[in-house]
Image (cartoon, rainbow, N blue to C red):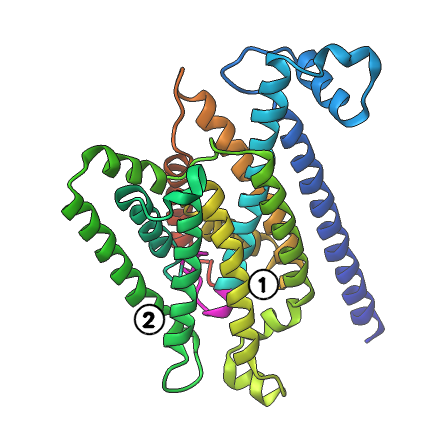
Amino acid sequence: MKEENLQEKRSKILRKTSYIAVFLGLLAFLIFSILAAITFGNADLSLKDVYSVIAYKLFHIKRLSEYAEGAIHDVVWLIRLPRVLLALGVGMALSVCGVVMQAIVQNPLADPYVLGISSGASLGATLAIMLGVGGFLGGNSVGVTAFVGALVTSFAVIFIANMGGKATSAKLILAGMAVSAVCLAFSNFVIYITNDKSAATEVMKWSMGSLAGASWNRVAVMLPITLIATGLFWTQYRNLNLMLLGDEVSITLGTDLHRLRTSYLILASVMIGFAVYCAGVIGFVGLVIPHVVRILFGTDHRKLLPLSALLGASFLIWCDVACRIVLKNSEMPIGVLVSIIGAPCFIYLLIRKSYGFGGGK
């Protein structure tokens, strides 16, 4: 009996140690990714120039005052660094929301857009581009209307799922599918009646996702929201674990998941709405990253959430780097590249006979 207890304690210590090691490793890799990613781009800049600009802006070192302004300063500080940090925020948001959505609807195929958020965002962007809705917002009209469309769609799904009784995971999925189909139909209808090929092309480009519009203003919105929401979800890991067991089990344990599910959906929708506003629609990140982490560390959201956040952020940073360098003097839409990478990975996960929801045998 004592030997079994001793082995169990050793096993717990080993699992905890391995988790801490992986967490610190992913955190270090994320920091390395940020520092490395800003050195890539069409402009040929030396490592000295890149890091001198950042060192001056952060620490105001007098001997580096030559980097206080100019072309090199603008490329590094106003273009590359905001873009990398925006990729960090968006990648983290998509991964965390993927974890949360999969727990809420108890479906391993759920992604951040399961509530029809992407379709609602696309409808908003289509109205802005094709019909000029929100034109008074200037250059932010497309992003803001997409954000509004994403939020309105998610709230509509929550409202429909709660009609005729409390929302369940099945009702949320069905409501999301229905609202998504309606939004797509309206988007296609607007494109058809407008018959503007150049505007239709712009809608298509927006739907492919891009971080080219990165700025410090967008980073100042996206990054704090992502970090705060991720921290809040991390504190709710017990309830998220409970959601995997279903409503009946949770009620027997004295917890009503209905209110929690609704509040989590609203918070996740806000995160995805801002991600859509900043970068358009980027698929597969919130679908594949949580599965990869589950295979290695199981379903416990105390581990799953932080590891998915770090891995998702690093993944999107390097995808954005690839988008900038794959095509010479051009840029590949990040949504296209992520799908090219993510789809085969997801197919591989599906055909693994030993893999089930949560990595169970």
Residue 114 position by quadrant:
bottom left
Per the image, label 2 sits on a secondary structure element best described as helix
> In the image, what residue occupies the spot 56% across and 55% down?
96
Work out whether residue 144 or residue 16 is closer to the camera in this orientation and state it.
Answer: 144
Q: Is residue 257 left or right of residue 336?
A: right
- Horizontal side, residue 21 vs residue 176: left or right: right
In the rendered image, residue 234 lying in the magenta stretch gets the answer no
- Crowding at mark 2 (Cα within 10 Å: few <14, some 14-19, many 20+): some
Pick the front one: 296 or 280:
280
Q: Quadrant of the N terminus?
A: bottom right
- Is disc 1 placed on a helix, strand or loop? loop
Q: Amino acid at mark 2?
A: Leu
Q: Nearer the viewer, residue 334 or 68?
A: 68
- Quadrant for residue 81, please give it: top right
Range covered by the magenta-colored residues: 102-113
Q: Position of residue 27 (x, y in %)?
A: 70, 41
Give the residue drawn at x 45%, y 41%: 140
Q: Which residue is mark 2?
A: 174
Q: Position of residue 6 (x, y in %)?
A: 83, 66
Main SS, magenta residues: loop
Whether residue 349 sits left or right of residue 91 in the image: it is: left
Sequence-wise, the earlier of marks 2 and 1 is 2
Q: Which residue is mark 1?
A: 299
- Can you see residue 264? yes
For the question of whether residue 314 can be seen, the reply is no
Q: Nearer the viewer, mark 2 or mark 1?
A: 2
Would you say residue 110 sits in the magenta stretch?
Answer: yes
Q: Position of residue 295 (x, y in %)?
A: 54, 54
Residue 38 in the image: above or below residue 174: above
**Residue in the picture at 38% in, 62% down:** 153
Q: Which label is found at residue 229? A: none
